[in-house]
Image (cartoon, helix red, strand yellow):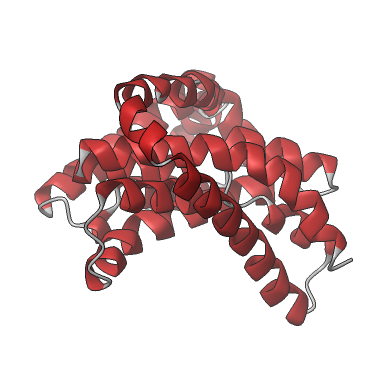
Amino acid sequence: MTEFAEIWSYLSQGPLLWLTATLAAYALGDACFRAAGRNPLANPVLISVVVLAALLWLTGTTYATYFAGAQFVHFLLGPATVALALPLYDSLPQLRRALLPVLAALIVGSLTAALSALAIAHAFGVSPEVLAALAAKSATAPVAIGIAERMGGSPTLTAMLVILTGVTGAVVATPVLNALRLKDWRARGFAVGVTSHGIGTARAFQVHPTAGAFAGLGMALNAIATALIAPFALSLFQ
């Protein structure tokens, strides 16, 4: 056991170990997702987060050590977000025909996402730092972290809240929208993109290509809207 501890201590300091662990955890989550018949409850991101969190806890590894190896995956968030422009371009004619409803839904969705979270958290008496992290939770991670930092929030807490928001949206969106009998793929996708950013958008692409394209649109526009709305919304509760 002593030799194993020494070997693990050496390996855990290398960035390749945690990059490999991240990819392996997601591969495990995706395999579980496929085995479950693509059931939204078996979300691969949720499974991989649980697996990695358990691994870090069991090995006593700090987040800083983990991130030193997994930061390459974090870097790919930017290119992945930009790549969503391709399916959006394919759906451009549909977007032009629905421009006014899209703008109205964006404003309402962005305001509701920020104000509802802040109102509930404020009622429970959470600290200003947590409020700042919550205000941007529905934007995509690179944008949300930047907004929260400028408002005095914790980047780590913001990243966690963004992931929780995305996973929750990816799990509950399809059953809720089905229960509401909403059949317009544009509306379904846009709603998921505004509320659940990249993780929700990935789920929308699995459901329908048009829903995925409009989810990408919602995610991109909500990032801009949140940058404008979040500071105003936060000021109401400070």
Tell me if I can see residue 48 in this picture. no
Residue 17's quadrant in the figure? Answer: top left
Q: Is residue 44 left or right of residue 134?
A: left
Q: Where residue 60 appears, x then y in whole percent?
A: 57, 47
Q: Is residue 224 left or right of residue 213?
A: right
Q: Is residue 164 left or right of residue 114?
A: left
Q: Where residue 31 appears, x then y in whole percent?
A: 18, 42
Which one is in front, 232 or 159? 232
Q: Count numbered badges in the picture.
A: 0
Quarter in which the C terminus is drawn: bottom right
For the point 75% across and 81% down, the residue is 123
For the point 37% across and 52% down, the residue is 46
Q: Where residue 82 appears, x then y in whole percent?
A: 48, 21
The answer to whether 222 is drawn above or below residue 23 in the figure is below
Residue 1's quadrant in the figure? Answer: top left
Q: Where residue 44 appears, x then y in whole percent?
A: 30, 46
Q: Is residue 161 left or right of residue 80?
A: right
For the point 22% across and 41% down, the residue is 206
Which one is in front, 37 or 185? 185
For the point 25% across and 38% down, the residue is 210
Which one is in front, 11 or 39? 39
Q: Residue furthest bottom?
A: 123
Tell me if I can see residue 81 in this picture. yes
